[in-house]
Amino acid sequence: MSLEKIHLREKIGYGLGDAASSMFWKIFGMYSLFFYTDVFGITAAAAGTMFLVARLWDSFFDVFVGILSDRTKTRWGKYRPYLLWFAIPFAVMGAITFFAPDFGDTAKLVYAYVTYSLMMIVYSLINVPYASLLGSISSDPKQRNSLSSYRMSFAFIGSFVTFMLLQPLIDFFSKHFGNEVTGHAVKAVETSVSTSPIGWVMGVGSIGIICVILFMLCFSWTKERVQQIDSEENVSVKEDLRNLFRNAPWWILVATGLAALLFNAIRDSVAIYYFRDYVKVNYRMEGTGWDMTTIYFLVGQAANLIGVMAAPAISAKYGKKRTYMIAMLIAGILSTGFFFIPNNIVWILAFQFLISVFAGYVLPLLWSMFADIVDHQELLTGRRATGLIFSSSSMSQKLGWALGSAMSGWILAVFHYMPDALEQSADTVFGEHIMISLFPAVCAILAFVGMIFYPLSDKKVKENSIQLEEKRASANN
């Protein structure tokens, strides 16, 4: 049953779930630091610390959600019901998080901590079971690779849609439902998205409605097939965790995934500042309202999508591990080169495209490799802790974005970023320059080095899959 052919509609349905998650995740990763400093009105250092605190503890909450979903029993399966239960809370909390109340400084900071933390909790409750669903739809490594590629392709399509819609939506709602904020929120260089609070809450809320629809389609179009061999009631949470912590490939993949996500998080979170303060190209595309920052993001997402779509064929030929290593190495080299290129939009967009293609190779491989680790652990222990293991992948994702966003805020503070300034200092601009180039390069090289020690080759993964199918067939006879 687990080797049943997966049809196109189900692959698309599975992909739509990550399209929804990614639409909000990109808002968090690329716009939230700017929102909190220039719209909400707290310092870059305070925002960075909040990102770290809120996401750090929430990263470990992912493990709880993984354990909980492994033990969930409904007529819809273990993991799919969470898409149904939390789709609407996901959208509502997103809009609340991007609401800027007229509070004092202390109350405002408390509001930011509470709403951002609650948003991350809801994100965990829908995204961890969604990720775990990959290991439950099929046990065939090739089908998983295909599903993972669809997932990442739709994730980037979702991100692309967000970048296409968010800035025009914010500007539209700002124009028609609120007055533009004056003073510190409006900069001399008109290349940034509107800073009107009403525009942000209504723009993000509109994206949330789309997310609800996509999650519902994912729930309806997918099916859970893979059943574990033993009875989960006889295995304690403590035993599951002990087995996980003894799994060497898991530790390596978490570490390399963390480095790869840091690479993306730092690059993405500083882009708005980089274009406004360093590039200073005052341009908006006719008929769209997109400025150069949005165009930069769109080029990156299109290039990511190319990498994601090419990853299955390339990894089938060269292996997942080797593809991952080469992609991160080249991304690191190109990011280093990004520091030295001229301040010219053609050069910047060209390097953004190339870097993003190679970064795109990595993400579907990462999720597919976590599914391989589920098989590896089941073969060693007899326990298929899919939710727990995939929650660890979500944990590494959140830790990567938490550390990346926190570091971005702290580094901006170190380089004396001032939200109220019409013109940033030379030190600040230099800091933004290295944050989008050299810091990500270091993270990419760390991911490359870590993957050298990853022991699950494609040959080993295939052997594990065959042995597990033989055990399941024997158990069913």
Image: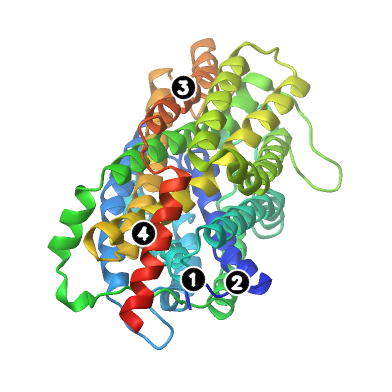
Identify the image's colour scheme: rainbow, by chain, secondary structure or one colour: rainbow
Q: Are marks 1 and 2 in contact (CB under 8 Å)?
A: yes
Q: Dot 2: within a 10 Å radius of its alpha carbon, few (fewer than 14), some, or many (20 or more) residues?
A: some
Tell me the CA gap for discs 3 and 1: 38 Å
Q: CA distance from mark 3 to mark 2?
A: 41 Å
Identity, as a three-letter code, of the amino acid under mark 1? Ile
Task: Give the SS element for disc 1.
Answer: helix
Q: Nearer the viewer, residue 54 or 35?
A: 54
Name which residue type carries label 4.
Asp
Is 121 above or below relative to 230?
above
Residue at position x 68%, y 25% from top?
A: 351
Q: Nearer the viewer, mark 3 or mark 1?
A: 1
Comes first in the chain, label 1 or label 4: 1
Which of the 4 quarters of the picture holds residue 463?
Answer: bottom left
Crowd tier of the residue under label 4, counting other residues whose Cα lies within 10 Å: few below 14, some 14–19, many 20 or above: many
* Residue corresponding to mark 2: 6
Point out the tag, 3 or 2, that comes first from the N-terminus: 2
Residue on which the image places disc 1: 137
| Residue 59 shows in this picture | yes
Q: Amino acid at mark 2?
A: Ile
Residue 439: give its label. Answer: 3
